[in-house]
Amino acid sequence: MNPYQSLPSRSFWRSAVAEPEMLAIGEVWTPKFGLAPDDAVLTAGSCFARHLGPALLDEGMNWREAELPPPGLTEAERRARHYGAFSFRTGAIYTAATLRQWLSWALTDDPGPDEVWRDGDRFFDPYRPSVEPDGYASAETTLAARRSTLTAIRGAVAEAGCLIFTLGLTEAWRDVATGTVHPVCPGTVRGTFDAGRHVFHNFTVAEVHRDLAAAVALLRAANPRLRVLLTVSPVPLTATATGAHALSATTYSKSVLRAAAGQLAQELDHVDYFPSYELISGFPFRGAFFAPNLRDVTPAGVAFVMRHFFDALERQRGESGPTHRPTTAADRRADATDSADGGDLYCDDAVLDHYRAG
């Protein structure tokens, strides 16, 4: 006898992945903890995370949008101002460091820098430069809007049962004057790049793990019942500032994020990892879930990921979930403004494609 003789079929590559009848990759995830339909769920992270909220709502789950749009906005106006994309109007949060930063501002006495960027007669928040596309009328209203978001984060975290956070990048731009991390390189979406102030940094596994652990600690201090489900976005880097090939840089970034998330999930009972990255990027699927630009995930890919997510939760509850879930209306809405060149409305880093040579 040896330990491998008692392992289930999902533990072996041939029976779990390679056999034709197993390509659905059943039981790819065994949840650590359940999510009841009435558990308040928050979502944040990279632009891929914007698919999760509508899918959770379609399934009858209690997804919380902590900042609701004012009355009178059209659907296009709501989308342009990032309502309905994530639980908070922070814009995309690509790195663990940025998540830690937002939570620190919301859950401690540090409100963050009072700097704003001016463009003509309009003002913009450096830490969410695309959330209000037309900007604000003054620096005061810009900072007041950020404070409203911090208040929304604080209130939602206090009542939530779970935060689903999707890691996207390891590359970031640090501001040495304020000690903060920007969501995207200044001078791209908004602002002016200052080579003496804005410094490139590519996070390591140890640094991502440190920032994730600190973020989880902030969340649990505010709400000891809250659990965290980590995922990694399958969306490749639009561009890399490392000087490396974009393919190698993407492999580094996703490997680091996956390793750090997996390590924290092994260490903490209240942290789990869901393999959305593997379900889209795994080579058994031969890139079938990517759009022709090999970057955007198709609605079918989103539906495939969410099917495995909900089926796993149903198995845990002792229910028998459907073997096939159709693409939902939320999936189609989420992709309605994606363009073939990666110009996703919610992806700040998609603007980097406009700076490529040629």
Image: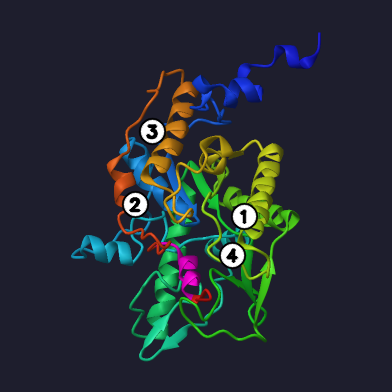
- Above or below, comparing residue 237 to residue 162 in the picture: below
The amino acid on which the numbered mark 4 sits, given as a three-letter code, is Gln
Between the residue at mark 1 and the residue at mark 4, the CA separation in whole angstroms equals 8 Å
Amino acid type at image mark 3: Pro
Magenta-drawn segment: 346-354
Q: Look at the numbered disc 2 and give the secondary structure of its residue.
A: helix
Q: Name the residue under label 4.
A: 101
- Mark 2 and mark 1 lie on one chain; the one further toward the N terminus is 1
Residue 145, image x and y in percent? 39, 72
Q: Which residue is drawn at 49% across and 51% down?
A: 157
Q: Nearer the viewer, residue 242 or 94?
A: 242
- Residue at point 42% right, 58% down? 88
- Look at the image and say whether residue 350 sits in the magenta stretch: yes
Q: What residue does disc 3 label?
A: 37
Q: Helix, strand or loop at disc 3?
A: loop
* Residue under label 2: 334
Give the vertical position of 91 relative to 298 (above or below): below
User: In x, y percent, where is residue 19?
Assistant: 56, 21
Q: Badge 3, how many Cα within 10 Å: few under 14, some, many 20+?
A: some
Q: Which residue type does callout 2 highlight?
A: Ala
Which is nearer the eye, 324 or 142? Answer: 324
Residue denoted by label 1: 215
